[in-house]
């Protein structure tokens, strides 16, 4: 089973997924808080707590089904390397991370000065881990409208890599989900993603999709969110 299938979805946190790929049951939550001027913050949380007993056992091994299982020290070092690179990225500040090896929950967060800086966040991680995040995912903010745009292009090679995984291992992804929450200071007038929902208070868009749906391309993360003036 190849780790690069999931590095393309969220590279820095998925570095620690050698064991997650074997446990299958996980949640990746990405939260973006946008301000009116286009600045904001982003936080990603990888939660393996549903499978923590199995993950704990797997992390005691060096290799499972051809996957190198990273040690806690290696996971921490890689996260620190990523944080160091992000701190040196123009427009990025307040970079923080946490690693909970009791419940197997990892978080990475930072503030961005503009949407351009948010894209640089992805670009920095792409360079750090040699993964093409920005080739399929980017953001734009049109202050005059105002509107927030997520551009997303499905990469068929993800499905091709996934198809190489034994069918029994593929079944492990049945309970894996990706969640994206985008909050705004103004109310939302409309949004274009058919899988997403607007929150009851009207200022956030919520999207939760199965990991397998992202792999096979049956759902898209693309969205244009128009705000009230």
Image (cartoon, rainbow, N blue to C red):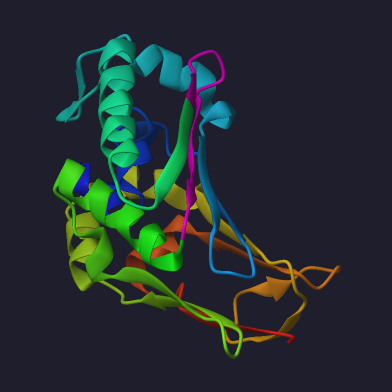
> From the image, which quarter does the N terminus lie in?
top left
Who's the residue at 36% across and 49% down the image?
A: 10
Does residue 58 appear to the left or right of 141 in the view shown? left
Residue 155 vertical position relative to residue 55 in the rendered view, above or below: below
Q: Nearer the viewer, residue 179 or 126?
A: 126
Residue 171 visible in the snapshot: yes
The x and y percentages for residue 87 are: 34, 37
The question of residue 94 being in magenta is answered with: no
- Depth check: give the residue in front, 55 or 183: 183
Magenta region's main secondary structure? strand
Question: Over which residues does the magenta segment extend?
Answer: 98-113
Residue 2: in sight, yes or no?
Answer: no
Residue 64: name its quadrant. Answer: top left
Q: Residue furthest bottom?
A: 145
Q: How many marks?
A: 0
On the image, the x and y values in percent for residue 118 come to 41, 59
Q: From the viewer's perspective, is 136 left or right of 206?
A: left
On-image quarter of the C terminus:
bottom right
Place of residue 51 in the rendered image (x, y in percent of width and height, measured from the top left): 52, 27
Q: Residue at x 57, y 83 (%)?
A: 147
Give me the residue at 38% from left, 33% from top. Answer: 20
- The residue lying toward the viewer, choosing from 57 and 229, is 229
In the image, residue 72 lies at what x, y percent?
Answer: 34, 13
- Drawn side of residue 192 relative to residue 58, left or right: right
Q: Is residue 108 magenta?
A: yes
> Is 84 displayed left or right of 110 in the figure?
left
**Residue in the image at 56% along x and 82% along y:** 143
From this view, report whether residue 186 is shown above or below residue 190.
above
């Amino acid at each position: 089973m190849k780790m690069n299938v999931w590095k393309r979805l969220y590279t820095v946190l998925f570095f620690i997924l050698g064991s997650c790929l074997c446990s299958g049951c996980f949640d990746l939550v990405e939260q973006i808080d946008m301000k009116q001027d286009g600045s904001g913050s982003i936080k990603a949380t990888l939660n393996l707590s549903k499978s923590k007993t199995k993950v704990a056992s797997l992390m005691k091994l060096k290799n499972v089904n051809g996957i190198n299982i990273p040690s806690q020290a290696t996971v921490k070092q890689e996260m620190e390397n990523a944080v160091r690179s992000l701190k040196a990225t123009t427009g990025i500040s307040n970079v923080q991370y946490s690693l909970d090896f009791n419940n197997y929950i990892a978080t990475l967060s930072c503030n961005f000065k503009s949407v351009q800086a948010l894209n640089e966040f992805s670009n920095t991680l792409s360079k750090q881990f040699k993964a093409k995040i920005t080739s399929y995912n980017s953001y734009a903010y049109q202050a005059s409208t105002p509107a927030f745009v997520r551009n997303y292009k499905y990469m068929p090679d993800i499905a091709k890599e996934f198809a190489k995984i034994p069918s029994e291992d593929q079944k492990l992804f049945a309970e894996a989900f990706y969640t994206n929450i985008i909050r705004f200071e103004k109310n939302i007038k409309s949004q274009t993603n058919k899988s997403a929902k607007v929150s009851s208070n009207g200022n956030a868009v919520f999207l939760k999709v199965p990991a397998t749906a992202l792999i096979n391309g049956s759902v898209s993360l693309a969205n244009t969110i128009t705000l009230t003036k």
